[in-house]
Image (tube, rainbow, N blue to C red):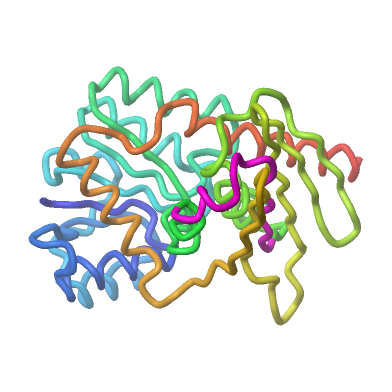
């Protein structure tokens, strides 16, 4: 399978090239074309991974690849980069977040429907071993009532504000819940943002802690059930992006998306609500 990457300023691009082109960790799938970044960055990544093509435009990848990963750090760029490929019938993984607005997210999903191809988007933390471990212990704790996901946030990030880091914790919480059935209640605090998301008989509690100048709060997950509690640190190991690549390649091969449209839109809706609350407080 021939893969393309758009938006190589993210270190996830380095991980993908390492896993696929250098380690051959997922069979014959490899990155053959890239777009984005400075000339120096793209040349260095292409040389490191033996990538044949450095494209001038995202559309130039059409016809050269079987599937594409859109990896721009700033989610506001994802719509413009993903839509032309999807309309042309190219399956796409949009690295977190799918978009920074619900309107952009819906446009991406509409393009996938128009092109007749699958699209997906997720934080790599959705497929972290800690989440799988919680799932395996679900019978021990009974029906889930609360999922508390903690992670760092940088409200003034130039890469889309709170969405850049905050979406990790949002997706960890929502992955274990039904899609939210109401808007979140958001509390904006001096050093953190707290969002409570109703989801059927349960709630997601998303605890976003402002990054410090030298350190950030580690990712953590706690699940409260009717019979017990499970708590797990979510550790980013050296190969933490590999499971997410495996999920994407399975989608590209089978045409079956791992997440439905409601699941894809849910974190964008939550992040949009959080961003609006922060803006209201700042105003």
Q: Is residue 77 left or right of residue 169?
A: left
Residue 31 spot, x, y in % from top left: 19, 59
Residue 54 percent across, percent down from the top left? 22, 59
Q: Which residues, given as a range, are shown in magenta?
A: 136-152
**Residue at the bottom extreme of this rendering:** 214
Return the x and y of residue 245 as percentages of the image width and height.
29, 56
Q: Residue at x 20, y 56 (%)?
A: 33
Residue closer to the observer: 136 or 29? 136
Using residue 75 as the reference point, say whether residue 258 is left or right of it. Answer: left
Q: Quadrant of residue 61?
A: top left
Whether the magenta-drawn stretch holds residue 149 is answered as yes
List the single residue furthest toward the left. 28
Q: Residue at x 32, y 25 (%)?
A: 112
Viewer-side residue, 52 vs 181: 181
x%, y% of residue 178? 56, 32
Name which residue lies at 24% across and 40% down.
Answer: 251
Quarter of the picture holding the C terminus: top right
Q: Residue at x 35, y 55 (%)?
A: 244
């Amino acid at each position: 399978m021939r893969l393309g990457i758009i938006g190589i300023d993210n270190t996830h691009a380095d991980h993908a090239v390492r896993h696929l082109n250098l380690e051959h960790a997922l069979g014959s799938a490899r990155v053959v074309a890239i777009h984005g970044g400075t000339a120096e960055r793209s040349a260095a990544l292409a040389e490191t991974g033996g990538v044949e093509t450095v494209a001038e435009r995202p559309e130039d990848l059409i016809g050269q690849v079987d599937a594409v990963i859109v990896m721009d750090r700033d989610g506001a760029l994802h719509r413009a980069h993903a839509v032309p490929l999807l309309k042309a019938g190219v399956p796409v993984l949009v690295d977190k977040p799918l978009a920074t607005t619900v309107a952009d997210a819906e446009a991406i999903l509409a393009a996938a429907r128009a092109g007749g191809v699958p699209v997906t988007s997720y934080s790599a933390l959705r497929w972290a071993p800690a989440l799988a471990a919680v799932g395996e212990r679900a019978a021990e704790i009974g029906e889930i009532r609360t999922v508390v996901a903690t992670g760092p946030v940088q409200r003034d990030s130039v890469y889309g504000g709170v969405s850049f880091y905050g979406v990790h914790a949002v997706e960890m919480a929502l992955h274990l819940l039904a899609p939210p059935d109401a808007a979140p209640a958001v509390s904006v605090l001096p050093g953190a943002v707290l969002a409570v998301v109703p989801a059927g008989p349960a709630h997601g509690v998303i605890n976003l802690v402002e990054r410090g100048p030298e350190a950030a709060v580690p990712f953590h997950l706690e699940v409260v059930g009717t019979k017990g509690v499970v708590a797990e640190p979510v550790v980013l190991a050296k190969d933490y992006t590999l499971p997410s690549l495996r999920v994407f390649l399975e989608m590209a091969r089978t045409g079956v998306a791992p997440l439905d449209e409601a699941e894809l839109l849910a974190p964008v809706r939550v992040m949009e609500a959080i961003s609006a609350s922060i803006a209201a407080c700042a105003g």
